[in-house]
Image (cartoon, rainbow, N blue to C red):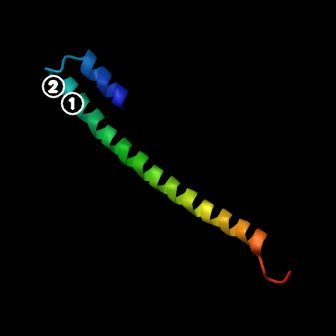
Amino acid sequence: MQELLEWVRATLPMDLDTPRMIEEKIESLLEKEKEVMQDFATEYERECRINLERNIEKCWEETFNTKER
């Protein structure tokens, strides 16, 4: 989206209504794109943390398990 926005600004005459409307639409889509990417990054970090905790627990149990087998 950012590349498209830069292209529109460099290519189209921004003194007309249609290019300005296109610019505004791209800017709104760019904001949505940023939100989606941030949500994905947050969820990815959460999943990584959960997986790390599980792996640590599994390693601990395999190495130091004192329960009778």
Considering every residue shown, the one lying at the far bottom of the view is: 68
In this picture, is 50 found above or below 32? below
Write the residue at 61% across / 60% down.
Answer: 52
Say if mark 2 contacts mark 1, CB within 8 Å. Answer: yes
Place of residue 20 in the rendered image (x, y in percent of width and height, measured from the top left) = 19, 27
Q: Residues within 10 Å of mark 1 (few under 14, many from 20)?
A: few
The tally of labels here is 2
Q: CA distance from mark 2 to mark 1?
A: 6 Å
Image quadrant containing the N terminus: top left
User: Amino acid under label 1?
Assistant: Met
Write the residue at 25% across / 29% down.
Answer: 22
Disc 1 on helix, strand or loop?
Answer: helix
Q: Residues within 10 Å of mark 2 (few under 14, many from 20)?
A: few
Write the residue at 45% across / 55% down.
Answer: 42
Name the mark on residue 17. 2
On screen, residue 51 versus residue 21, left or right, reads right
Image quadrant containing the C terminus: bottom right
User: Amino acid under label 2?
Assistant: Asp
Place of residue 59 in the rendered image (x, y in percent of width and height, measured from the top left) = 72, 65
Place of residue 18 in the rendered image (x, y in percent of width and height, measured from the top left) = 20, 25
Disc 2 on helix, strand or loop?
Answer: helix
On screen, residue 7 versus residue 48, left or right, reads left
Q: Nearer the viewer, residue 34 or 19?
A: 34
Q: Nearer the viewer, residue 46 or 63?
A: 63
On screen, residue 24 versus residue 40, left or right, reads left
Instruction: Report the residue marked by disc 1.
Output: 21
